[in-house]
């Protein structure tokens, strides 16, 4: 990953309390896993941003190196990597995700 790609990823994560790197957008997810993550976050009715990795091969590869996580989607909340679809589902079902989101929105 080039320093420029790392800086772009850093900026996206720092500028958005909730940032999702996914296939497609929150209005039109392009895979089931990305759609699941969007549906979960939408239940909280909080602002968040998405980045369509299908439109940017450098970010698509770079985000995997950045997080040391091989799959997409990837969710960052308050600058911290939370995980992908399976982890988001698990955190949501346990009720832990709501607390993470509330803390992020309050900060």
Image (spheres, rainbow, N blue to C red):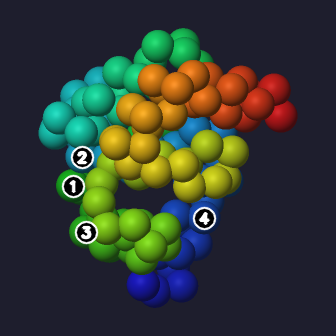
Count residues near mark 1 (Cα–Cα under 10 Å), then give few for <14, some for 14-19, many for 20+.
some
Are the residues tagged 1 and 2 within 8 Å (C-beta)?
yes
- Report, in whole angstroms, how far the alpha carbon at label 4 lies from the one at label 1: 19 Å
Vertical relation: 58 (above or below) 81: below
Task: Identify the residue at horizontal 68%, vertical 26% (top origin).
Answer: 99
- Report, in whole angstroms, how far the alpha carbon at label 2 lies from the one at label 4: 19 Å
Task: Identify the residue at horizontal 66%, vertical 53% (top origin).
Answer: 79
Q: Find disc 4 in the rendering and name its residue.
A: 10
Of the two numbered discs 4 and 1 on the same chain, state the one appearing first in sequence: 4
Front disc: 2 or 3: 2
Q: Is residue 84 left or right of residue 11?
A: left
Q: Find disc 3 in the rendering and name its residue.
A: 57
Count residues near mark 4 (Cα–Cα under 10 Å), then give few for <14, some for 14-19, many for 20+.
some
Task: Identify the residue at horizontal 39%, vertical 32% (top origin).
Answer: 89
Q: Is residue 101 left or right of residue 53?
A: right
Vertical relation: 65 (above or below) 48: below
How far across and down, in percent of the image, does residue 2 sit?
46, 86
Are the residues tagged 4 and 1 within 8 Å (C-beta)?
no
Task: Identify the residue at horizontal 54%, vertical 49% (top origin).
Answer: 82
Are the residues tagged 4 and 3 within 8 Å (C-beta)?
no
- Report, in whole angstroms, how far the alpha carbon at label 2 lies from the one at label 3: 11 Å
Q: Find disc 2 in the rendering and name its residue.
A: 23
Residue farthest along the right direction in this orientation: 107
Are the residues tagged 2 and 4 within 8 Å (C-beta)?
no
């Amino acid at each position: 990953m080039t320093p420029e790609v790392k800086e772009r990823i850093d900026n996206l994560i720092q500028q958005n309390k909730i940032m999702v790197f996914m296939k497609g957008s929150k209005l039109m997810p392009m895979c089931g896993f990305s759609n699941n993550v969007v549906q979960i976050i939408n239940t909280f009715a909080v602002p968040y941003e998405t980045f369509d990795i299908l439109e940017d091969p450098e970010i698509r590869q770079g985000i995997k190196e950045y997080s040391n996580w091989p799959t997409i989607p990837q969710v960052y909340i308050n600058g911290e990597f939370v995980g992908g679809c399976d982890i988001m589902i698990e955190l949501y079902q346990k009720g832990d995700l709501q607390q993470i989101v509330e803390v992020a929105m309050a900060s």
